[in-house]
Image (cartoon, helix red, strand yellow):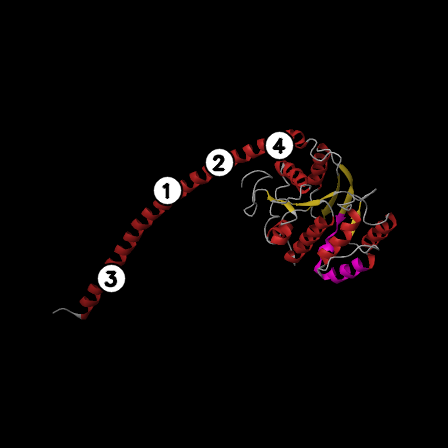
Amino acid sequence: MISMRYHIVSITAVFLALAVGVVLGSTAISSRLLSGLTDDNSSLGEEVADLQASQNGLNAKLADADRFATSIGPLAVKGLLADRTVVLVTTGDAEPDERDAVVELLRSAGATMTGELQLTDAFADPKKADQLRDLVARLQPAGTQLPTGGDPGTRAGGLLGALLLLNKDTNQPQATPDETTAALAGLSSAGFVKQGQGLRPAQLAVVLTGGAVAGDSAGDRAATVARFATQLDRSGAGAVLVGGEGSADGTGAVGVVRADTAATSVLSTVDNIDTAAGRVVAVLALREQLEGKSGRYGVAGNAEAPAPGAAG
């Protein structure tokens, strides 16, 4: 007669066999799985190495192209801005090396630099927008008229346009020396601008910015600079807004201008001023402004062409 103990031992043996089978089976599966993962990891490592090698090759080619553009740039722009005067306006995030390279190339084009004005971080600070707007109204030179736009960028562009640019029809200053001195001193004292020595009005302007604007209220800051540059263009014979990598994005001043068809109809933009080729394009775009033309140039997706006269 089969006892209860026999049943218990039998059932225990069955479950023990199942457990051993599961362990052995999972060990075999784990071994195969680990082997497959190892192979996949090795394959991915090879792909990463190939991509890195490809990137290194592209970087080397870009460096060679940049060196070539640097050497040929002065010849490419020679005489394009002969007998023309240019004022440089920079923002606080503009790179000093790019500033120096732009000025050097403008001089190679025959332009006479009339000075530099830097817009401080406070200039585009939304918290100080009302202060800037009110100050601009008080500093307006007699005989000039500020634009109807109520935003501080446009209003400041109207004021500084009258101070920094010559009348495009008469080629004469739009404000007296005393008015210019007083207005710039007022803006400087309030912390909105920093002016270089010997600053005087010019026919054309280059507004040099950095890349994408970061931090709080980035969009508002970029919009203020974009609207300022647009109004500055309307105040004289022409202007070009230039920026580096990321400047054509939504958080960059170049990108804000390109999203506004009214602005792009008058103001030219260049989005790769951090390259030698981009600096050459900036000079070409400034020359084009004298002909009443504008364009969106560079390498970003919202550029219409790499340079004036080149198909996109």
User: What's under tag 3, amino acid-wise?
Assistant: Phe
Left or right: residue 87 versus residue 35 is right
Q: Position of residue 6 (x, y in %)?
A: 18, 66
Q: Residue at x 79, y 57 (%)?
A: 136
Residue at label 1?
A: 39
User: What's under tag 4, amino acid-wise?
Assistant: Ala
**Count of numbered circles on the image:** 4
User: What's under tag 2, amino acid-wise?
Assistant: Ser
How far apart marks 3 and 2 lie (CA) works out to 57 Å
**Is 307 within the magenta?**
no
Sequence-earlier tag: 3 or 1: 3
Q: Residue at x 56, y 34 (%)?
A: 62
**Is 135 within the magenta?**
yes
Q: Nearer the viewer, residue 180 or 224?
A: 180
Q: Main secondary structure of the magenta part?
A: helix
Sequence-earlier tag: 3 or 4: 3
User: What's under tag 1, amino acid-wise?
Assistant: Asp
Q: Residue at x 82, y 59 (%)?
A: 138
How far apart marks 4 and 1 lie (CA) works out to 45 Å
Q: Nearer the viewer, residue 47 or 157?
A: 157
Marks 3 and 1: which is nearer the front?
Answer: 1
Residue at label 4?
A: 69
Marks 2 and 4: which is nearer the front?
Answer: 4
Asked if one can make out residue 216 in the rendered structure from this viewpoint, the answer is no
Residue at label 3?
A: 15
Which region of the structure is painted magenta?
118-137
Sequence-earlier tag: 2 or 4: 2
Residue at label 2?
A: 54
Whether tag 2 and tag 1 are in contact, CB under 8 A, the answer is: no
How far apart marks 3 and 1 lie (CA) works out to 36 Å
Marks 3 and 4: which is nearer the front?
Answer: 4
